[in-house]
Amino acid sequence: MTSPTTAPDTRPVPVPAPAAPPVLSVRDVHITDRSTGREIVRGVGFGLTPGRSVGIVGESGSGKTLTCRAVLGILPPHFEVSAGSVEIDGTDTAGLTPASWTALRGSTIGAVFQDPASYLNPSIRVGAQLAEVLRVKKGLGRRAARDRARELLDTVRLREPALVAGQYPHELSGGMLQRVLIATAVAAEPRVLIADEATTALDVTVQAEILDLLADLRERTGLALVVVSHDLAVVAQTCDEVLVLRQGEVVEQGPTHEVLHAPRHDYTRLLVAEHERYGLERFRTAKEDA
Ligand SMILES: Nc1ncnc2c1ncn2[C@@H]1O[C@H](COP(=O)(O)OP(=O)(O)OP(=O)(O)O)[C@@H](O)[C@H]1O
Ligand SMILES: [Mg+2]
């Protein structure tokens, strides 16, 4: 077993830093719970240009999901961005109306969360749900939407897209549902995709396949990714940059290989040490063994 500090760097070869303007700029964001006056997230910042990926890691309750929700404009009712800014594709989101937010979500920025079943209607076939998104967000006609839905199901590597399109959510496995959700999230060709614990509930082999799918979308379409996980190995596999959150604060941030192979903060060392047993390359291994 190799120790994390000497393990070879097996990350995907990073895309060279492009000169393109950022699609997402998060600057020194603070999030406050107005009901208690407590500042839950204190100063998170990162930027993403097309095709790049950033990982947010940290223990339960550290503020990962709230950060994502702030970026998506879906903070719980009594929470607010109390300082800092979020800019999506050059637009400062501070002054956005609910209608502008709705237009932005799905078309410019999309998200996939941990529990795919809860985002699908149990009584409608998945192909029809995906087609509906295409009609609303892309203005496609009925037939074009149906054809495009099948194509998208194929893109997310569902083996029999036509068959899957005709199935109800309960007929699909967790991994298949997560692929359907990713297809739905990328249907309107957003520039940024947020995956918040999107693979956590899946077994290791399926996790590896989904992470590989996200990496592929990123390379082929220039999709920028925010990958949230409490699991460092997920981020090691997919991200150029990593932020380590602890109790609402960024304790360490930098290029993934630097942070993981030469962690500076005690807390990051602890997270890395937790992986000593299986190594940070376990997804790669799991996939090759599959
Ligand atoms: N809807 C809510 N109402 C009240 N408090 C909340 C709500 N959502 C989050 N919090 C609080 O904000 C803090 C950060 O929560 P958040 O969900 O961002 O953590 P997380 O890092 O995503 O954790 P996990 O790994 O468990 O998903 C927690 O202390 C949590 O109790
Ligand atoms: Mg969370």
Image (cartoon, rainbow, N blue to C red):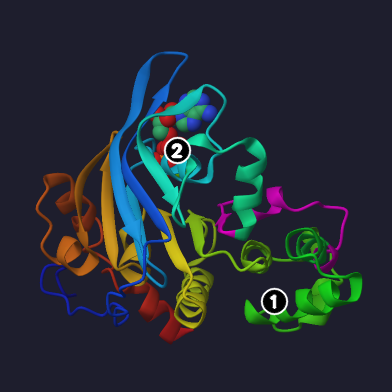
Amino acid type, residue under disc 2 in the picture: Leu
Residue in the image at 52% along x and 78% along y = 221
Dot 1 amino acid type: Leu
Identify whether 251 is placed above or below 112.
Answer: above
The percent coordinates of residue 60 (x first, y second) are: 38, 39
* Coordinates of residue 129 in the picture (x, y in percent): 81, 61
> In the structure shown, which secondary structural element does the residue marked by tag 1 occupy?
helix
The stretch drawn in magenta includes residue 269 = no
> Where are the magenta residues, as a range?
108-128
Ligand 1 neighbours mark 2 (CB distance < 8 Å) = yes
In front: 134, or 111? Answer: 134
Please tell me the numbered disc located at residue 152. Answer: 1
Residue sitting at x 30%, y 42%: 44
Q: Which residue lies most toward the top here?
A: 36
Residue 36 lies left or right of residue 130; in this view the side is: left
Q: Front-most of 274 and 93?
A: 93
Q: CA distance from mark 2 to mark 1?
A: 29 Å
Q: Which residue has dot 2 on it? A: 66
Q: Quadrant of ligand 1?
A: top left
Q: Nearer the viewer, residue 172 or 99?
A: 99
Q: Quadrant of residue 239?
A: bottom left
